[in-house]
Image: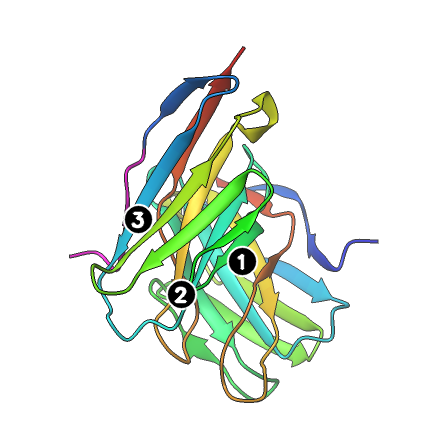
């Protein structure tokens, strides 16, 4: 079984709809991340969480919200989807070495979201 | 200046060729450096970490030049399966990783 899973894998929705993307991990990592990837723009960080009680905005958080329900689960919501949120969304996890350093990130398989 | 810059390519090379990618970063306090590989429509995966003294993993060699703030990846004896996008990744501090936009490599038979 995959260590980092994302649901759904593909989603087509309409402008104005509320969408939730879910991420689960079995790696036991404290840190979780949401990215979006667009052609020519690379990976851009939306939100990240270093533990269950910690939520931080990334580079492009406007129009998104997150919930860290447990160590293993990190959800991304689009309250009112718009067409320019059409993208490939990745969840990732990483561990801490106890000294505050972030190490290797492990990515989920991605969710392809299309907003019409 | 962007935090992490890479030549987007594409680099089109024949099988067996040696190819090198460079990447520059802007934050001189950056602590950790990585190369990730991403296949088309797939998730990025760690290829190798980059250590100050340089490191090698089979056909892949990574080097770091802190003074000039650049990282390199050398691939020897290229295989068709090496075709992918290679992402340069930097950790500025106790903050999330910063990803470059990637360099696309196509190895041609």
Q: Secondary structure at mark 3?
A: strand
Q: What residue appears at the point 42 percent right and 80 percent down from the top-left corner?
A: B94
Q: Residues within 10 Å of mark 3 (few under 14, many from 20)?
A: many
Distance of label 3 from label 1 (alpha carbons): 39 Å
Distance of label 2 from label 1 (alpha carbons): 46 Å
Residue B31 percent coordinates (x, y): 38, 73
Q: Nearer the viewer, residue B75 or B30?
A: B75
Q: Nearer the viewer, residue A40 or B49?
A: B49
Q: Are marks 2 and 1 in contact (CB under 8 Å)?
A: no
Residue A114 percent coordinates (x, y): 51, 39
Query: Which span of residues is magenta-colored?
Result: B1-8
Instruction: Say which residue label 2 marks.
Output: B52
Q: Are marks 3 and 2 in contact (CB under 8 Å)?
A: no
Q: Is residue B3 located in the magenta-colored stretch of the structure?
A: yes
Q: What residue appears at the point 38 percent right and 42 percent down from the top-left corner?
A: B102
Instruction: Say which residue label 3 marks.
Output: B23
Q: Secondary structure at mark 2?
A: loop
- Residue under disc 3 on the same chain as residue under disc 2: yes
Q: Is residue B101 above or below residue A28?
A: above
Q: Which mark is residue A18?
A: 1
């Amino acid at each position: 079984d995959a260590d980092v899973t994302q649901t759904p894998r593909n989603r087509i929705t309409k402008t104005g709809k509320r969408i939730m993307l879910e991420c689960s991990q079995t790696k036991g990592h404290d840190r979780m991340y949401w990215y979006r990837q667009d052609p020519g723009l690379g990976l851009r960080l939306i939100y990240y969480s270093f533990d269950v009680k910690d939520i931080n905005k990334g580079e492009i958080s406007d129009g998104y919200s997150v919930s860290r329900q447990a160590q293993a689960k990190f959800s991304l919501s689009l309250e009112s989807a718009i067409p320019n949120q059409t993208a490939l969304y990745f969840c990732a996890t990483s561990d801490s070495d106890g000294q505050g350093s972030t190490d290797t990130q492990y990515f989920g398989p991605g969710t392809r979201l299309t907003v019409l | 200046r962007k935090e992490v810059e890479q030549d987007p390519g594409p680099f089109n090379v024949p099988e067996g060729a040696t190819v090198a990618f460079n990447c520059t970063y802007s934050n001189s306090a950056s602590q950790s450096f990585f190369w990730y590989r991403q296949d088309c429509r797939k998730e990025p995966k760690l290829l190798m970490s980059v250590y100050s003294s340089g490191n090698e993993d089979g056909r892949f060699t990574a080097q770091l030049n802190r003074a000039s703030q650049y990282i390199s990846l050398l691939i020897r004896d290229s295989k068709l399966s090496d075709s992918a996008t290679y992402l340069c990744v930097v950790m500025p501090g106790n903050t999330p990783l910063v990803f470059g936009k990637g360099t696309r490599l196509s190895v041609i038979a």
